[in-house]
């Protein structure tokens, strides 16, 4: 077990003791020990073997015994005993950022709240505000915390697009301090995972105490969760946990690599190191024969040392990147700059906010060579879907505006509904007039797997369809993907020479990295689009590219990396 594993059990013990209302000094002692172990500059297992546990501040007497027990057995008896006395649902409540053990205890004792669902119900029924020490404001805060916790897809996780600007804001403030030399986000943010649990920051500083103090006093810090010399954690803006580690310059690379993860990637890397005679952990490579430790200032040195080609963080999920790195055959991943046009754009003809002219201008400023204006079809009446007659007017408008613009080609298009029976919303006679036809499912989402798969496949068999948009229909915090056999859909796309979309809208990211990877492996064309409804939505392309990179996608796998000339010939557009 590593330092963070040991620290996690001790922290949980502290929470449980506080929840049970036991001697507060006892809880504080566990928390202090956990903090010091987390911020330790050495591997705790190694210290145990060398009988040096007593050197760790706060790990004396009774707690030292517990640490030994954890390192020997993975847990400790007193913890197991205490945990068994608490309703299991309480652990979920203690997991919600912004709800501490004292509040959880009060809610449990006064309202018998034993689970996250029970907590949500009590908040909605306004039972919490009636408690002493509570009020409408506190109740509202709890309600928001629970909803955020539940709606972030996986409980306790925040969508990348929400975490990104927060990370930038914090980094900017930290960089403004003269005593912070460098700060970089590690963890799942750096790997560009679609949701993140917390924000892990790693920094270099000549005056760590000052750096920590500056961090703890950032304006939007709502709660200090942990405070230490080398590691502190806060709840930021009541939204997300942020950890800051100050690390020594000589092992910056080793630590950055370690805290970027993923866990699976690191486990595989450690196995490889062992085969080569090294023990690898967050502090460096220990040569097993000589006990000499090698630390890396640059992250690349970690991979060099193992004879591996450097994998960008997005690839580090142990999905074959280590094997490919050994053979120096890692992919040359797609980048934002490779995108030459956007094929899924809504104007104010349907539910977009902007005129076709403004969209064209904005795309031109981005350096795009083409965009397709793909307003909704008439079934999606809520989104102002166009009748066949209006669509033909729309097409005319697009081509007359296109004539006014130099340097960008406006393609006429539609986002055409696939009706529940599999028929498209427009007749073939109308569809054949358009440059780009996107087909999409927007209603009748509760069909069974067989029906839904058949419905989508029949749309892909239509000769006028070019792209299938947001193929699984999932929306973060709103609804799960509908039930569909993705392999069959991809096979139909391949057989009919259609492209499948990676929709970059942060609430969709659909296809996700796994499905996009499957499409790539099968050799299906991909299109990375933003589904823009407002000018600044064009910026979301970044998130679609993140998904694509995690799926090992290269520029040539994607249709809209083509320059206009190649693009129109690929899609047989006149
Ligand atoms: Zn759509
Ligand atoms: Zn759309």
Image (tube, grey):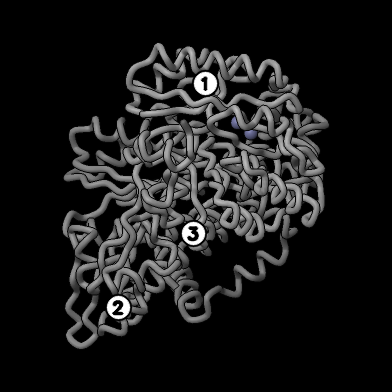
Location of mark 3 (residue): 523
Q: Which mark is residue 273?
A: 2
Q: Position of residue 73 (x, y in %)?
A: 52, 80
Q: Mark 2 and mark 3 in contact? Answer it, CB < 8 Å.
A: no
Q: Is residue 176 visible?
A: yes
- Judged by depth in the image, the label closer to the viewer, 2 or 1, is 1
Label located before the other in sequence (2 or 1): 2
Q: Mark 2 and mark 1 in contact? Answer it, CB < 8 Å.
A: no
Label located before the other in sequence (1 or 3): 3
Q: Position of residue 502 (x, y in %)?
A: 52, 44
Q: Quadrant of the N terminus?
A: bottom left
Question: Residue at (49%, 31%) from the top-left corner?
Answer: 237
Cα separation between marks 2 and 3: 34 Å
Closest to the observer, 149 or 325: 325
In this rendering, the count of numbered labels is: 3
Question: Residue at (76%, 34%) from the top-left corner?
Answer: 123
Q: Which mark is residue 69?
A: none
Cα separation between marks 2 and 1: 49 Å
Quarter of the image holding residue 151?
top right
Closest to the observer, 178 or 352: 352
Q: Mark 1 and mark 3 in contact? Answer it, CB < 8 Å.
A: no
Q: Tell me if mark 3 has few (under 14), some (14-19) or many (20+) residues whose alpha carbon lies within 10 angstroms of its own.
A: some
| Mark 3 element type | loop
- Judged by depth in the image, the label closer to the viewer, 1 or 3, is 3
Location of mark 1 (residue): 534
| Mark 1 element type | loop
Please determine whether, in this image, residue 554 is positioned above or below residue 41: above
Question: Residue at (17%, 85%) from the top-left corner?
Answer: 290
Cα separation between marks 1 and 3: 32 Å
């Amino acid at each position: 077990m590593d330092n963070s594993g040991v620290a996690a059990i001790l922290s949980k013990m502290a929470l449980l003791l506080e929840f049970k209302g036991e001697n507060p000094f006892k809880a504080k002692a566990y928390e202090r020990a956990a903090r010091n172990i987390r911020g330790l500059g050495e591997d705790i297992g190694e210290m145990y073997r060398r009988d040096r546990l007593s050197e760790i501040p706060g790990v004396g007497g009774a707690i030292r015994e517990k640490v030994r027990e954890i390192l020997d057995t993975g847990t400790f008896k007193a913890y197991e005993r205490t945990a068994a006395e608490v309703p299991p649902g309480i652990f979920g409540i203690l997991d919600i950022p912004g709800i501490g053990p004292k509040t959880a205890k009060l809610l449990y004792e006064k309202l018998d709240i034993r689970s996250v669902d029970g907590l949500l119900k009590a908040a909605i029924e306004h039972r919490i505000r009636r408690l002493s020490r509570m009020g409408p404001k506190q109740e509202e805060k709890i309600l928001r915390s629970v909803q955020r916790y539940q709606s972030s897809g996986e409980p306790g996780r925040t969508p990348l697009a929400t975490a990104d600007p927060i990370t930038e804001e914090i980094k900017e403030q930290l960089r403004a301090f003269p005593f912070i030399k460098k700060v970089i986000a590690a963890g799942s943010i750096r790997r560009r995972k679609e949701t993140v649990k917390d924000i892990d920051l790693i920094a270099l500083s000549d005056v760590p105490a000052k750096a920590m103090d500056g961090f703890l006093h950032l304006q939007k810090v709502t709660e200090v969760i942990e405070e230490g010399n080398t590691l502190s954690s806060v709840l930021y803006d009541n939204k997300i946990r942020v950890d800051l580690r100050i690390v020594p310059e000589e092992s910056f690379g080793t630590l950055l690599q370690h805290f970027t993860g993923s866990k699976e990637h690191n486990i595989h890397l450690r196995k490889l190191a062992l085969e080569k005679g090294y023990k690898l952990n967050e502090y460096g490579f220990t040569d097993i024969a000589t006990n000499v430790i090698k630390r890396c200032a640059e992250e690349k040195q970690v991979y060099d040392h193992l004879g591996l080609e450097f994998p960008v963080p997005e690839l580090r999920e142990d999905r074959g990147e280590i094997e490919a790195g050994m053979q120096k055959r890692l992919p040359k991943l797609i980048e934002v700059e490779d995108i030459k046009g956007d094929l899924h754009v809504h104007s104010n003809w349907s539910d977009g906010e902007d005129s076709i002219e403004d969209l064209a201008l904005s795309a031109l400023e981005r350096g795009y060579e083409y965009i397709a204006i793909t307003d909704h079809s008439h079934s999606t009446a809520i989104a102002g879907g166009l009748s066949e007659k209006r669509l033909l007017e729309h097409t005319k408008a697009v081509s007359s505006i296109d004539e006014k613009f130099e340097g960008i080609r406006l393609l006429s298009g539609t986002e055409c509904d696939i009706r529940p029976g599999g028929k498209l919303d427009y007749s073939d006679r109308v569809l054949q007039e358009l440059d780009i036809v996107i087909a999409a499912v927007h209603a009748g989402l509760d069909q069974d797997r067989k029906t839904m798969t058949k419905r989508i496949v029949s749309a892909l068999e239509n000769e006028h369809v070019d792209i299938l948009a947001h193929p699984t229909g999932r929306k973060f915090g709103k609804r799960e993907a509908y039930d569909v056999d993705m392999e069959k859909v991809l096979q139909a796309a391949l057989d009919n020479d259609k492209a499948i979309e990676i929709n970059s809208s942060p609430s969709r990211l659909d296809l996700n990295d796994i499905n996009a990877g499957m499409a790539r492996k099968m050799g299906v064309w991909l299109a990375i689009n933003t589904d823009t409804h407002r000018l600044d939505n064009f910026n979301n392309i970044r998130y679609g590219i993140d998904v694509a990179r995690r799926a090992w996608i290269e520029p040539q796998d994607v249709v809209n990396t083509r320059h206009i000339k190649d693009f129109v010939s690929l899609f047989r557009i006149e």
